[in-house]
Amino acid sequence: MSVDPQQLLRELFATAIDAAHPQHVLEAHLPTDRSGRVIVIGAGKAAAAMAQVVERCWQGEVTGLVVTRYGHGAPCEKIEVVEAAHPVPDAAGLAVAKRVLELVSNLSEDDRVIFLLSGGGSALLALPAAGITLADKQSINKALLKSGATIGEMNCVRKHLSAIKGGRLGKACWPATVYTYAISDVPGDLATVIASGPTVADPSTSAEALAILKRYAIEVPASVRNWLQSPESETVKPGDPSLARSHFQLIARPQQSLEAAAVKARQAGFSPLILGDLEGESREVAKVHAGIARQIVQHGQPLAAPCVILSGGETTVTVRGNGRGGRNAEFLLSLTDSLKGLPGVYALAGDTDGIDGSEDNAGALMTPDSYARAAALGLSASDELDNNNGYGYFAALDALIVTEPTRTNVNDFRAILILESPKHDA
């Protein structure tokens, strides 16, 4: 088989990103009647690219405002694009959130609102609840990101500290008709979790938010604790009539990207094994992947090589050291440490938005000689893992993947290529 493993891995990653790009997935879901006035709002890493699609397809009057991460903007003529900070909100995100809320207030039954939602929207559309400061939200956000909390847990807290999330934006639009088009970046594709569900009813409670803060030993100011103990902090619940004219449509999800990559792999002669959306500590998820890869190489189970293991989802990193690197670099470093140069095994881990955590790379590549090459440079995979330094490890090997912002986001993408013929036991 004359395949360049590293090139194929890059092609699989590009295919996964392409399958979730707004220019390919949004237009078919827009309302059939595209005449008349529409107000477009949006938040997330794909917001600007989604806004471009609406501008291109809508036949009537279009106005609006969307917020995306710094560097993820795209030129629009009618819809204003503002950039703000992610994953920790900043003053720009606060200011644009106020403007978005004002834009949809005092609408009538004849008005239509299109809300373009994608991963990152939770931090980008940051409007703290009454009595809570931006600094409070920033410190809690930072603590949650370092704690190892899942995206669902983080968003439960965010919703209950917000004046715009947990259905509150949808309620503000009443009695206008709202169409939310979402690109999922969360395991399970739950509308209540994607960017903290600004236009959908939320079944979680303030008591649950308090329990999450306690579980991860996150200290909060008295003002935050008092707010969460108040009935006013509750989000908009299922059955609330103010959301009766709010419609939610998922237009892209991680599974679509994994399936597209699987088709590409088959065309190259590799049998795909899709593990689906995964959560958990990056380093522990990597150990499971390593175990599956080893079983394939040594025993031809659960499928024979040549094959590729595909997975997505959103892992977490509990920060222990002071190195550089997001969850994908951490996954790949743990995989490298676990496999220790197992012959015929190549891997890629990257974030489909083009940014791994807060670094400038999307992810990295591992080859069978990565472990030995790094050791020759004096780098210990286990020591670098202890320091959460996946970025530094793969930078030294010139194995970082840099894509620039992709303007979509279906979260992590992992692919492990196995070239070796299985060595069956006698």
Image (spheres, rainbow, N blue to C red):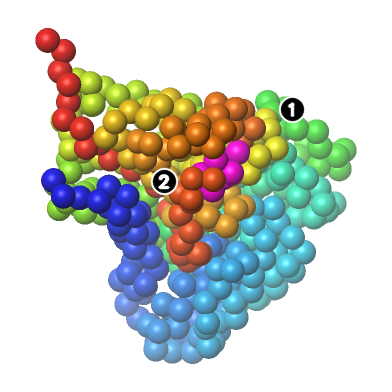
How many marks overall? 2
Task: Pick the residue in front: 291 or 33.
Answer: 291
Report the residue at 37% width, 50% height from top: 254
Q: Is residue 191 visible?
A: no
Tell me the residue that label 2 is attached to. Answer: 365
| Residue 50 visible in this rendered orientation of the protein | yes
Judged from the image, the secondary structure of the residue bearing numbered disc 2 is strand
Label 2 neighbourhood size at 10 Å, few (<14), some (14-19), many (20+)? many
* x then y, percent, for residue 323: 66, 39
Q: Which residues are magenta?
A: 389-395
Q: Kindly indicate the quadrant of the structure image that contains residue 44.
A: bottom right
Question: Which residue is drawn at the image coordinates 74% and 60% (left, top)?
Answer: 90
359 in relation to 106, above or below: above
Viewer-proximal residue among 408 and 371? 371
64 sits left or right of 23 in the view: right
Query: Circle 1 sits on which residue?
Result: 217
Q: Earlier in the sequence, mark 2 or mark 1?
A: 1
Q: In the figure, is residue 185 to the left or right of 30?
A: right
Q: Is the stretch drawn in magenta largely helix, strand or loop?
A: helix
Decide: is 39 above or below 362.
Answer: below
Give x and y (percent) for residue 265. 21, 49
Residue 3 or residue 131, whichever sits in front: 3
